[in-house]
Amino acid sequence: MIRTMYKSGTALAAVLLAQFVAPAHAASGWGELNMPVGVTELSKKIYGLHMMIFWWCVAIGVFVFGWMIWAMVSFRRSKGAVANTAMLHSTKAEIIWTLIPVGILVLMTVPAARVLIDIEDARNTELTIKVTGYQWKWQYEYLGTDVGFYSTLAHESNAARQLQSGIDPRSVPNYLLDVDNPLVVPAGTKVRLLLTAQDVIHSWWVPDFGMKKDAIPGLVNEMWIKVDADKTGRYRGQCAELCGRDHGFMPVVVDVMSKEDFESWLAARKAAQQQAALAANRNPSIS
Ligand SMILES: [Cu+2]
């Protein structure tokens, strides 16, 4: 009986572990328990560090609990074990069990510091976008160009979320995760984001990019992303700082395009904004 339990327990643990380390693109099931590998240079480094420390912890856990369980089973009273009441203190043991964990922690800081230094290294970026958080929307400005726009919750989601709207949220695709104007960035390019806010603290977060950073009024925070050249597509995130009543209604949507597509998108956007400005000048009543 115990043997079967032990066997099925081991099998269960093996299944759980296998699921836990399954690739993040397995979009359902236990694979979701782990953090996503992501699509940027940094997200992969962060994931690698996370998995490395995870396996170190597994090894430490197996060693400590294995030793503990072995000692409990081997030296149980029914087997005639007698407590050693003479040993009240051992300086040697204390030195050993202090030095080993300290050594492990020091070893862990080396790879962790390397990743941290990479995260902070926003040199040689090719494009800078200023991101401003508002209650409750985002503003994106492509510095050095005239392109800038607000990104607010998509109309369909906004209509469905109203009290007694009569709209079933399940009928809205990407409910509360869609915006009217997504941020557009080129793939394979080191893009710097300058984050700030106009009212309260917000936090810009796209899990697939591996980065989350606070947008704080009166302060400019910096982060950088470099999406793999072959990972074009749409990525989603949310404001990750409780920022008031509609905190849950200011999602982040990023369209990652190839460099060529991005250039033509930027040119089209520029032309459209210039035209809008001209039209507004011609007819000042439109604003
Ligand atoms: Cu917010």
Image: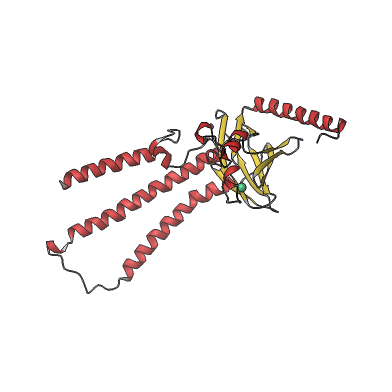
Q: Position of residue 241 (x, y in %)?
A: 58, 50
Name the side, left or right, on which 281 lies relative to 16. Answer: right
Residue drawn at 21 percent across, 73 percent down: 85
Residue drawn at 56 percent across, 34 percent down: 235
Q: Where is residue 278 in the image (x, y as percent from the top left)?
A: 84, 30
Residue drawn at 49 percent across, 48 percent down: 111
Above or below: residue 62 compared with residue 174: below
Tell me, yes or no, if residue 144 can be seen here.
yes
Q: Position of residue 221 (x, y in %)?
A: 65, 49
Name the side, left or right, on which 142 lies relative to 15. Answer: right
Q: Where is residue 60 in the image (x, y as percent from the top left)?
A: 35, 52
Name the image quarter holding residue 74. bottom left
Residue drawn at 51 percent across, 41 percent down: 45
Above or below: residue 61 compared with residue 91: above
Above or below: residue 176 compared with residue 279: below
Name the image quarter holding residue 152. top right
- Number of numbered discs on residues: 0
The residue lying toward the viewer, choosing from 114 and 125, is 125
The residue lying toward the viewer, choosing from 178 and 61, is 178
